[in-house]
Amino acid sequence: MTTDHIAGHLRAGGHPPGGVRDSADVRVEQHRLPQTYAAFAALRDATGEQTAAVLQVLALYGHAVDNGDPDLLARVFVDPPALDGATSPSHHTVNTEVKQVPGGLAAWSRLVTIAGDGSVASADVVDVLTETPAGWRVARRTVHPRHGGPVVVTDGEAPWA
């Protein structure tokens, strides 16, 4: 299993909506993101209520993907990706930090996947969330594999970049 597998189940073809379209759009980032994280960490913290709501939304992601539940996935994303039906590893979102950004919230998490053969991959996942009438939803997701592999980025710049 490669670390790009982390995002590979999001849509047939392996990419989230608006994400990487072909290999020419893929770039490899370094293992760590200290400058990017420092800019994120300097943002104003979300309120406790906002943080609790975002943690709930991000927790649903693993359940939705691991169980192939598109209705549950619609409670995570503004524009939910199609599930490809393939057997995917177990997903665990941990170490989430939530900040306020113009027009919404941003969450920086670690995504850990565990495959049936015991192999493990991890990535930094940065989500930008917007509040909808149904609650907070992920509007933009960027996946930075921790051990090489392509970065999967949805359209648009991070609001703190």
Image (spheres, rainbow, N blue to C red):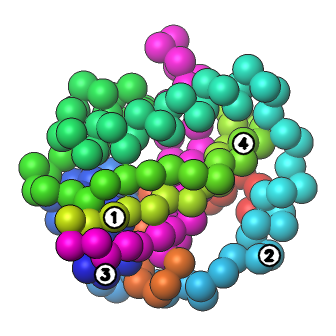
- What's the residue type where badge 3 is placed? Thr
Tell me if residue 154 comes above or below residue 98 in the rendering.
below
Cα separation, mark 4 vs mark 1, equals 24 Å
Asked if residue 21 shows in the view, the reply is no
Residue occupied by mark 4: 98
Residue 72 pos. (x, y %): 30, 28
Tell me if residue 151 comes above or below residue 57 in the rendering.
below
Residue occupied by mark 3: 2
Residue occupied by mark 1: 114
Cα separation, mark 4 vs mark 2, equals 17 Å
The numbered mark, 3 or 1, whose residue comes first in the sequence reads 3
The numbered mark, 3 or 4, whose residue comes first in the sequence reads 3
Contact between labelled residues 2 and 3, with CB atoms less than 8 Å apart: no
Residue drawn at the location 50% of the way across and 31% of the way down: 57
- What's the residue type where badge 4 is placed? Val
Q: Is residue 43 left or right of residue 153?
A: right
Residue occupied by mark 2: 35
Contact between labelled residues 1 and 2, with CB atoms less than 8 Å apart: no
Cα separation, mark 3 vs mark 4, equals 28 Å
- Disc 2 packing (10 Å; few <14; some 14–19; many ≥20): few
Contact between labelled residues 1 and 3, with CB atoms less than 8 Å apart: no
The numbered mark, 2 or 1, whose residue comes first in the sequence reads 2
